[in-house]
Image (spheres, rainbow, N blue to C red):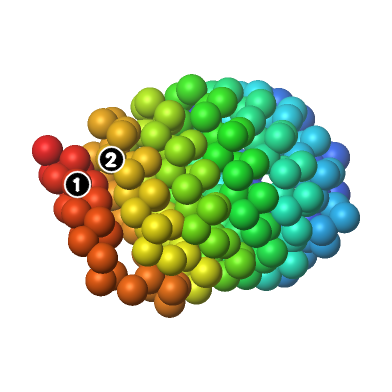
Amino acid sequence: MDQQEEVFTVLEQVNTVNVQYLEKIFFQLSYNLKDEKAPQLGIILARCIKVTLLTIELYFNNISYQGAAAIFQGLALCQNIIYLKLDLRQNKILDLGVSNLSTQIINLPKLSNLQLELRSNFITSKGAFELGKGLSKCIRLSILNIDLMSNNLKDDGAQNLFQGLSRNPSVNQLKLNLRNNLIQKKRGNYNRMKRLVLKQIIN
């Protein structure tokens, strides 16, 4: 029998459930998770050893890169994840947070569908470079949606992100939002790398 999705709106709810047996989990914690509680969520995620479909909504929580690192460390232990939606819009994870995410996400060997919402997190080209590098190593990833709107990416950051994505032949569906950054789109490398990514996806 197909298991129903378990929804948690506060962390305290988890104490009443054996999360290690759940396959579909939705943490709906937007506006509701202080940065100091982020490590607690990381500990809970580390116990979700059977989860295959995981949604984590954390937008508008003012989470720092330290809090994000604690969450990602626990997430990396969810070895059976196939689908992951991670919504961190309007936080403060910075380049350090993205770098940590990129390091941990490659530890999810079954991940095939990733929805990544990183809008308004003060991410620069350095963070985009680390993200592209990490995603290039997710060998089973086929569906990818990245929202980096309203950060501080420049042309070189976009190019590095494109380059990383172009090195992952498994991705066949891509949606990428880079609006409201510092991208000029004038240099030839930007358009050339963008065409390379699109060619990779089309083929």
Q: In front here: 186 or 18?
A: 186
In the rendering, at what x and y percent does residue 44 appear? 77, 37
Residue 135 vs 65, above or below: the answer is above
Q: Amino acid at mark 1?
A: Leu
Q: Amino acid at mark 2?
A: Ser
In the rendering, at what x and y percent does residue 199 appear? 14, 45
36 left or right of 46?
right
Q: Quadrant of the C terminus?
A: top left
155 left or right of 133?
left
**Circles 2, 1 touching at the beta carbon (< 8 Å):** yes
Residue drawn at x 23%, y 40% is 172
Instruction: Look at mark 1 in the image and give the residue it sits on.
Output: 196
Q: CA distance from mark 2 to mark 1?
A: 7 Å
153 left or right of 144?
right
In the rendering, at what x and y percent does residue 171 appear? 29, 37
* Figure disc tally: 2
Q: Does any portion of residue 122 appear in the rendered image?
A: yes
Residue drawn at x 87%, y 55% is 36
How crowded is the residue under tag 2: few (<14 C-alpha within 10 Å), some, or many (20+)? Answer: many
Q: Quadrant of residue 49?
A: top right
Instruction: Look at mark 2 in the image and give the residue it sits on.
Output: 166
Q: In front here: 77 or 97?
A: 97
Residue 27 vs 91, above or below: the answer is above
Residue drawn at x 82%, y 61% is 34
